[in-house]
Image (cartoon, rainbow, N blue to C red):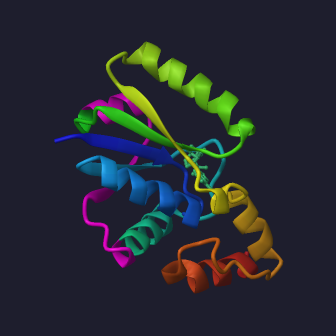
Amino acid sequence: MKTCIYPGTFDPFTTGHLDVLKRGCAIFDKVIVGLLKNSSKTPMFSLQERENFIRKAAQAEGITNFDVISFDGLLVEFAERQGASALLRGLRAVTDFEYELQMAAMNKKLKPELETMFLMTSTQYSFLSSSIVKEIGAYGGCIKGLVPEVNRLEIAERLVRQ
Ligand code: ADP
């Protein structure tokens, strides 16, 4: 049974994130979305909201071999507790690369047997980030296609109200 952890803040979960999750679930027996509790990014959406968005979106896609578990502390230790053999990350532009390389190198140093695997973004999502969604949504712009359709209204309402 090959399990991987797909860690992130997911504030909020975008269609780009969903694309990586779906593709990860086709490769691994199980993908655990590791929801970061104490992110330095000070998330706008609560842990519960973020978890609900991920669960609803994955269920709407018919994905069954996933779970969502929040964590804080060291990612490699969380991965070990979950029995995961790999970390899954998405790569968009060159700008992601430097940070991801640093993280992967550090995690490798902490736990050499835990591999970090990268999935290249699908081209239509290469411009997409949670920050862009929050920016557009805050000004009442249309976020259709940027977040999973099942979550769109809830996210849009929340963003214009903030
Ligand atoms: P973090 O706070 O750890 O950067 P994010 O929630 O921003 O977490 O992203 C989680 C993962 O998903 C990261 O590996 C990020 O590169 C990847 N990701 C984010 N947006 C996209 C996208 N549009 N396409 C592919 N991967 C993405």
Q: Please state the horizontal and vertical placement of residue 125, each as a whole percent of the image.
A: 64, 60
- Which residue is more in the foreground, 19 or 45? 19
Task: Point out the stretch of residues depicted in magenta.
Answer: 59-80
Q: Is residue 1 left or right of residue 75?
A: left
Q: Quadrant of the N terminus?
A: top left
Q: Is residue 41 left or right of residue 30?
A: right
Query: Relative to 152, does residue 114 appear above or below in the rendering?
Result: above
Q: Is residue 4 left or right of residue 20?
A: left
Residue placed at 66% from the left, 84% from the top?
157
Residue placed at 49% from the left, 82% from the top?
150
Q: Quadrant of the C terminus?
A: bottom right
Q: How many marks?
A: 0
- Which residue is more in the foreground, 137 or 29? 29
| Residue 14 shows up from this direction | no
| Residue 26 shows up from this direction | yes
- Which residue is more in the foreground, 19 or 10? 19
Question: Where is residue 140, by image quadrant?
Answer: bottom right
Query: Relative to 112, does residue 134 appear above or below in the rendering?
Result: below
Query: Relative to 100, does residue 32 appear above or below in the rendering?
Result: below
Residue occupying the far front of the picture: 123
Q: Please state the horizontal and vertical placement of residue 100, each as a whole percent of the image.
A: 60, 32
Q: Please state the horizontal and vertical placement of residue 75, each as a whole percent of the image.
A: 42, 33
Residue placed at 73% from the left, 57% from the top?
127
